[in-house]
Image (cartoon, helix red, strand yellow):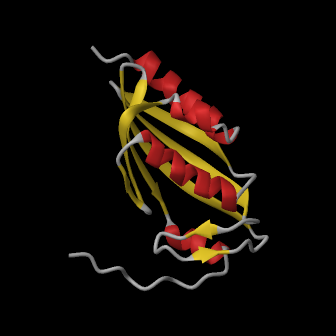
Amino acid sequence: MPDVVNAVSVVDRFFSAYNAHDPEAVLSCFAPQAASVGPPGQSENRDQILSYYELIWTGFPDVTFTVWQTITEGDEVAATSMAAGTHTGPFTLPDGEVIQGTGRRVAARVCWVFGVENGLIVSQQVFYDQLEVYAQLGLSCPAPVHRP
């Protein structure tokens, strides 16, 4: 039987840890072999997931998420949120290009879907409008990536 209370609790802890930029607390929310899929690609364990968050924290040292809504179905939690931060440090784009801080404030709507087992996040899908972020950073649209 799904444990809805623990599912919501670990997602709440994740957002608190993320907003505090606390690597150890973020890691404690994920199972060791947790998987994440989002615009930058796929991460196949919690250390890779944390590495991606640390790239964001470096580029946007004040970034936080404001959670608007969570919806729970069994061991899955969906959350809508607003990410906001100032681009003051180097930031790696999905194509691998690194851009230096622009000083621009960026805000983007983000949707998350978490899978939870035994009180830990085992999967995470992240959706956001990359063009919205590029435009706010003053960047042009990247060339399409052709994958086999």
- Where residue 4 appears, as percent x and y from the top left, is 40, 19
- Where residue 123 appears, as percent x and y from the top left, is 36, 39
- The residue nearer to you, when weighing 46 against 6, is 46
Single out the residue that lies furthest toward the left: 148
**Is residue 143 found left or right of 18 in the rendered image?**
left
Q: Quadrant of residue 3?
A: top left
**Is residue 19 found left or right of 113 in the rendered image?**
right
Q: Residue at x 49, y 73 (%)?
A: 96
- Where residue 147 appears, as percent x and y from the top left, is 26, 76
**Is residue 104 found left or right of 74 in the rendered image?**
right
Single out the residue that lies furthest toward the right: 103
Q: Residue at x 49, y 40 (%)?
A: 79
- The residue nearer to you, when weighing 70 against 24, is 24
Q: How many marks?
A: 0
Above or below, 139 relative to 56: below
**Is residue 120 found left or right of 147 in the rendered image?**
right
Above or below, 126 relative to 93: above
- The residue nearer to you, when weighing 90 against 116, is 90
- Where residue 54 appears, as percent x and y from the top left, is 60, 51
Q: Residue at x 59, y 74 (%)?
A: 98
- The residue nearer to you, when weighing 104 against 89, is 89
Above or below, 91 relative to 79: below
Q: Quadrant of residue 91?
A: bottom right
What is the quadrant of the N terminus in the image?
top left
What is the quadrant of the C terminus in the image?
bottom left
Q: Residue at x 44, y 51 (%)?
A: 126
Above or below, 107 relative to 23: below
